[in-house]
Amino acid sequence: MEIIDAIILGIVQGLTEFLPVSSSGHLEIGSAILGDDKIPEESLMFTIVLHFATALATLVVFRKDIVEIIEGLIKFQWNEETQFTVKIILSMIPAVIVGLFFEEELEQFFGGKITFVGFMLLVTAILLFLADRAKNTGKPVGFRNSVLIGLSQAIAMLPGISRSGATISTSVLLGIDKNKAARFSFLMVVPLIIGKIAKDILDGALTYNEASFGYLSAGFVAAFISGFFACTWMIQLVRKSKLTYFAIYCTIVGLIAIFAGIYS
């Protein structure tokens, strides 16, 4: 992989991890366009590095919230911070179940199936369109809601379904405040990313050699910088009900992917 390709894919990952347009779907399309023919181990290592970069960007953007959560937890009380942590844990359960028991089945949807990606992008567009028309409230995320949001996150493991789009849309359609929905959506994925990285390391699935250091570093930096700005921007967009623009974008890209997949 060339460094310029790594930077491009890093920027794509950083933007699409937070913007509701599906990072996995765009990486699939991007890899198809760039002709990514790397062996699975190298591709996996690169993907993990990019996801770690976006997770780090999330931690930086929400650093004050995270400090408050940690401070609340060490008090060992049933306070707001402890309850928020429990909600995050509940939201993780569906994705953990899918990741542990249906990993092989999930992998069947990857590998250049851009027609499928296109249809899933259309699903994302519908969710965004509906969410943008929901009324904003001051309702916080409840325990039951956190499980439902977690289910949408598990479904978003399919390429083309935007994780942020699905979770934020589900939250807003459940009547949750848009700002709180965005905050919960971005924070709930961090433990999953860290857990996935740890699992791959323990399984010995990751390989590294000195020749890959250049493009891995370039991809990491590109994903972190673009992710930081995308995360900050997305919070403002959700608050101002600007998701319809992304619904239109997902529709256009989805249709292009469908036709490209059918006629390629």
Image: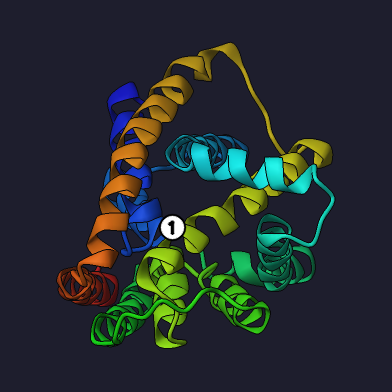
Horizontal placement of 127 versus 251: left or right? right
Give the quadrant of residue 194: top right
- Where is residue 58 shown, x and y percent of the image? 47, 43
Give the quadrant of residue 18: bottom left
- Amino acid carrying mark 1 in the image: Ser
- Where is residue 175 shown, x and y percent of the image? 43, 86
Residue at image location 51% in from the left, 74% down from the top: 140
Numbered disc 1: secondary structure: helix
Give the quadrant of residue 135: bottom left
Task: In the rendered view, tell whether residue 213 sits above or below residue 78.
Answer: above
- Where is residue 228 shown, x and y percent of the image? 35, 38
Residue at image location 52% in from the left, 62% down from the top: 184
Task: In the rendered view, tell whether residue 106 sits above or below residue 221.
Answer: below
Position of the C terminus by quadrant:
bottom left
Residue at image location 55% in from the left, 74% down from the top: 141
Task: In the rendered view, tell whether residue 114 sits above or below residue 49.
Answer: below
Residue at image location 25% in from the left, 50% down from the top: 233
Position of the N terminus by quadrant:
top left
Q: Nearer the viewer, residue 243 or 208?
A: 243
Task: In the rendered view, tell whether residue 153 sits above or below residue 133.
Answer: above
Horizontal placement of 58 versus 8: left or right? right
The residue where tag 1 is placed is 24
Display coloring = rainbow
Q: Nearer the viewer, residue 168 or 143?
A: 143
